[in-house]
Image (cartoon, rainbow, N blue to C red):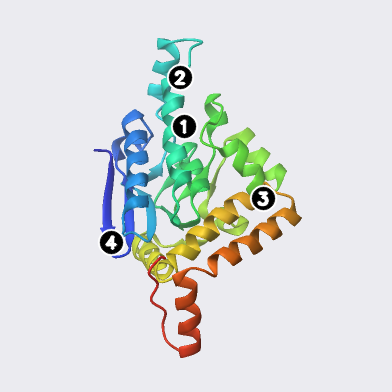
Amino acid sequence: MTVHYMNRGPAAWIVLDRPEALNALDFGMLEELAQAMQRADADPDARVVVLTGQGRAFCAGGDIAQLRADMEAAPGQPSRYVDAVERGFDAVRALSKPLVGCVNGVAVGGGLELLLCCDLVIAARTARIGDGHANYGIFPGGGSSALLPRALPINLARHLLFTGALWPAARWHELGLVNQLADLTALEQETQTLAEDLARKSPRLLARLKQTINTCLDKPLAQALRDELGELRSHMQSADMREGTSAFLEKRTPLYSGN
C-alpha cells in the first residue's frame, strides 16, 4: 500500500507513502488515492479529510519513469498513465467533505495540483511549492494550467507555469493559496486542530458551501446570486439549520447531525 487511511477523531487522514520516490504519483498510488477519497466520502466518522505526505515531500508530482514508459509503449495511442491521473484527480475533486492539505515538504507538479484541489492548506514553513512541469517539457494534467490562472493574477500564473519555479510556502501564504503556516514539528497538530474546528460545523452546510463555491465562478454573477438564494431556501428545510438557529436562541453549543 502506498496510500494509508486513518481516522483521528472526526478527521480522516489520507497519507501518501512512497517516501523513497518523494511520493511521486504512480499507477498504484493514483488508484489507491481515488479509493481513499471514495472511502472518506462514505465514512460516517469522517467529517473532514486531511491529505498529507510521508517523509521529506508532500508530493513531487507524477512518476516520470512510468509516464515515459507509457509514451514508449504505445506512441500516438491513448495514455494509460493520463487515464490514471484523470481518475485519481477526479476522485479528489469529487470529495464532498472539506479537504485540508497538510504540506509537510516539497509540493511540485502534481503535488501543487493536489493542493489546488484542497479547500484549505496548511504548510510547513520549510515547504517549497511550485508547478515544475516546464522544467521537463511536460504539459500539466492535474489542473494547474486551468486552476492557477483562476487563483492568481494571470502574469503570476504564467510565471509559475512557464518557469517551473519553486517558491517558499511563505510566498504562497502571501498570495492566499496557503491559509496557514506552521513549524514542521507542530504541523500535524495544527492541522488536526483546524480539522476538529471544521468538524464542529454543520456537515450539511459545509458540503453545500463547498459545492456552491466550486461552481459559482463559472456562472454570471446574477445567476450565482440567484442560485445562492435557491440553496438557502433548500437549506432552511435541513435539521442542521434548525439545530443551529435553536442553539443560537437557547445560548448553547449546536450539535449537528448532518441532516
Of the 4 image quadrants, the one containing the C terminus is bottom left
Nearer the observer, 22 or 151: 151
Question: For residue 145, what is the image quadrant?
Answer: top right
Residue 56 in view, yes or no: no
Residue 209 in view, yes or no: yes
Percent position of residue 228, x then y: 64, 61
Residue that numbered label 3 is attached to: 217
Q: Is residue 96 left or right of residue 156?
A: left
Residue that numbered label 1 is attached to: 86
Q: Tag 1 or tag 4, which sits nearer the N-term?
A: 4
Q: In this figure, what is the number of numbered marks? A: 4
Q: Tag 2 or tag 4, which sits nearer the N-term?
A: 4
Q: Please name the amino acid that badge 4 sits on.
A: Arg
Within-10-Å neighbours for mark 4: few <14, some 14–19, many 20+: some
Q: Please name the amino acid that badge 2 sits on.
A: Ser
Q: Tag 2 or tag 1, which sits nearer the N-term?
A: 2
Q: Is residue 183 left or right of residue 227?
A: left
